[in-house]
Image: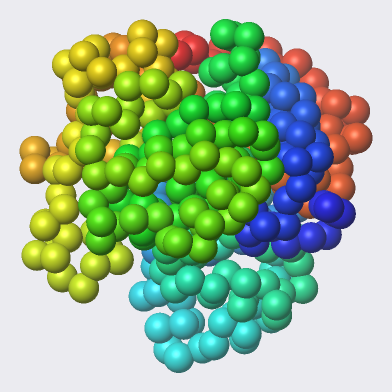
Amino acid sequence: MQFAGSHILSISQFERADVERVFAVADNMEPYARRRRRTRVLDGAILGAMFFEPSTRTRVSFGSAFNLLGGEVRETTGFEQSAIAKGESLYDTARVLSGYSDVIAMRHPVSGSVAEFAAASRVPVINGGDGSNEHPSQALLDLYTIKAELAGRGRGVDRLRIAMLGDLRYGRTVHSLCKLLGLFEQVQLVLVSPTELRMPAEIVETLKARGHEVVESDTLEASISHVDIVYSTRLQEERFTTREEADLYRGRFRLNQSIYTAHCEPNTVIMHPLPRDSRENARELDDDLNDNPNLAIFRQTDNGLLVRMALFALVLDVVDQVDACSTPVTWYTGRREL
């Protein structure tokens, strides 16, 4: 893949070598993300952060990643704050805002909309999530986390055993992660969901065609007993027609410490793309797991900075200049590592 000047819209753009390239650059971003060094490699550059769907982690992570490379961020949040509310097309919006930015990170509630926007943009566009379709940067940070968590155990991503739980029909993070895992060897996937919320069939068939073992289940306990990773997802309430329809599935496949202790192997890693739903009738990932050292959800969010910094550096073709534009940090951050 040619990164410089390219849009990042789908995991389908990536080969395994491209993923390894992103991860190698992400590794080199560690001192900057952890505030041990400061770089101004993107001094004067502008990120247009266009988030037309509610977002906290992804929006702030993209913005922080750009700031940590020395760039500035201009944000649009919600349709009501944009000219789209006045009837402006994505084409016109893209033509205008790409004139104000050097790169754009975009989230939109309609599948395919980010690609439509990118087709009219004069600068690279990174997909921050489009409807129930994909979330490529989340999949990359998830896999980066998986790689890091397993490395300490002398394991790699090949022959990974992973269970994905919850809303697999509308959860764009698991769609992208499955596509990414398809690039590796002999992955075993257990897909745990209600029948109505199963992983899209085309994704399952693609995984099987590439030689991976895929099991679909609606039973939690047996599905998490022999895996390296349990990846839980939130019910995507916003994709349902009514809240009452979503309530039919809310609270299914709840993972808590007692279930983990009884059914998971001792070092099974727990992941979640966040936000986790902490309302009493949901709790797909219970708060009583917070002290479990295998809970990796906040290591995931930290890794998001590394991966998104790497994507910006690659797309804007400044990877080889990052260190040359750096200085040590002399102020105390007061940060504690997880």
- Residue 207 image position (x, y, % from top left): 57, 49
- Residue 311 image position (x, y, % from top left): 71, 45
Instruction: Specify the quadrant that holds the C terminus.
Output: top left
76 relative to 238 in the view: left or right: right
- Residue 136 image position (x, y, % from top left): 59, 51
In this rendering, is residue 235 above or below 290? below
Name the residue: 63% across, 59% down: 10
In this rendering, is residue 7 above or below 219? below
Depth check: 93 or 257 in front? 257
Depth check: 265 or 173 in front? 265
Depth check: 27 or 161 in front? 161
Name the residue: 17% across, 60% down: 246
- Residue 247 image position (x, y, % from top left): 11, 57
119 relative to 242 in the view: left or right: right
Depth check: 30 or 199 in front? 199
In this rendering, is residue 217 above or below 80? above
Name the residue: 41% across, 11% down: 267
294 relative to 155 in the view: left or right: left
314 relative to 111 in the view: left or right: right
Residue 13 shows in this picture: yes
Q: Quadrant of residue 52?
A: bottom left
